[in-house]
Image (cartoon, grey):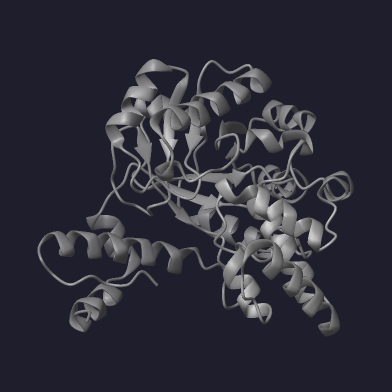
Amino acid sequence: MPDTWIENFAKKIPLPAYQALVRREVIGLCYHAVSAEAQPHLDHLIPYKTASMFEQDLLFLKEHFQLISYEELLAHRAGNLRLRPNSILLTFDDGYSECYSVVRPLLLKHGIPAIFFLITSCIDNREMYFRNKVSLCIDAVLKMEPDEHMRVFTAVNRNFAQSIQNTGDFIHWIKPMRLSECELVDQTCRILHIDVPAYLAARKPYLTREQIKTMQAEGFAFGAHTRRHPSLSLMESAEVEDEIAGSCHDVMAITRREEVGFAFPFSAHRVDREMLAAIVSRHPYISLMFDTKGIQKDKPFILSRISADTRPEDPHSTNIPQLMHAAYRYNLQVFLSRLGFSSLTQS
């Protein structure tokens, strides 16, 4: 049972006090997509903000923080540039096409830099990230007429030895699927008559090489996010190296950059740090790595980020202060847990 006095104490500390007491050179913010339209390949995986919500974030950040580019971060790390404490770097994972059509115009409007991390097998819409297929499956079942459910659930139960009885069972079964179960997801798509190549051709959910090159010419940076978006903690070291170094090499081939940043898919939790250090030493074109642990400190070559996708309760206001406050509270939780206190919840 959590120590409520600790939780209450942590919540009462205002954000400016946290920022003054717990200084970070750079705070990363992590988004995935920004869209006012329904995105069936995303809707059942992650939240995402509308363009107006995202612009409210940008206005708040411009007023209260120094917003830096990836190049400025590298220059700072090399000792060639001094940054204000708690400078902000905007990052986007997965490489969705809305980064070009929705995010890019707003960043250009406000003169704000960012770095975009790409699942390289999805560039040019050659393939679909397996969890986007999962979202399409969930979307199809939710939109299906009730009399169709029995056909689908019977086929799934027969093919995969399941006992699915309703929509909730189906979602509970398919949503945790991993990359190793991609063929199972593909079979489910066929049962649901989901034509993934047609969806890719019609919707073009991912960035193309030409869009990447256009954005790079406008000053935006690009990094790698593996080739297939696996959980690296479940892979052998050789596979991890292939996903990290291979995807960085893929991005280098498009951008002609001599070094490329890398963002972990899901997180770097339980990924051996000595192995990562060895990978970086063998592939010097891998520059910084990015995780999703809020403001937690890690190895010098890993920068944590705060997830910023959650929509605000008030659609006309930013929730960045609340998301930052939660990250600082969680940082306090980790500190206190190391001193023997009970854990807090990150909320």
Residue ID at (66%, 81%): 165
Q: Is residue 197 visible?
A: yes
Where residue 345 appears, as percent x and y from the top left, is: 32, 72
Question: Does residue 8 appear left or right of residue 101 in this picture?
Answer: left
Pick the front one: 325 or 290: 290
Residue drawn at point x = 45 percent, y = 41 percent: 232
Residue at the left extreme?
A: 339
Query: How many numbered discs?
Result: 0
Quarter of the view holding residue 10: bottom left
- Quadrant location, the N terminus: bottom left
Q: Nearer the viewer, residue 203 or 98?
A: 203
User: Residue 236's spot in the image, x, y percent?
Assistant: 41, 34
Please tell me which residue lies in front, 314 or 223.
223
Which quadrant of the view contains residue 80?
A: top left
> Which residue: 70% across, 46% down?
96
Q: Quadrant of the C terminus?
A: bottom left
163 relative position to 297: left or right: right
- Left or right: residue 86 compared with residue 71: left
> Residue 234: horizontal and vertical position, in percent?
42, 44
Q: Residue at x 38, y 54 (%)?
A: 294
Q: Is residue 78 visible?
A: no
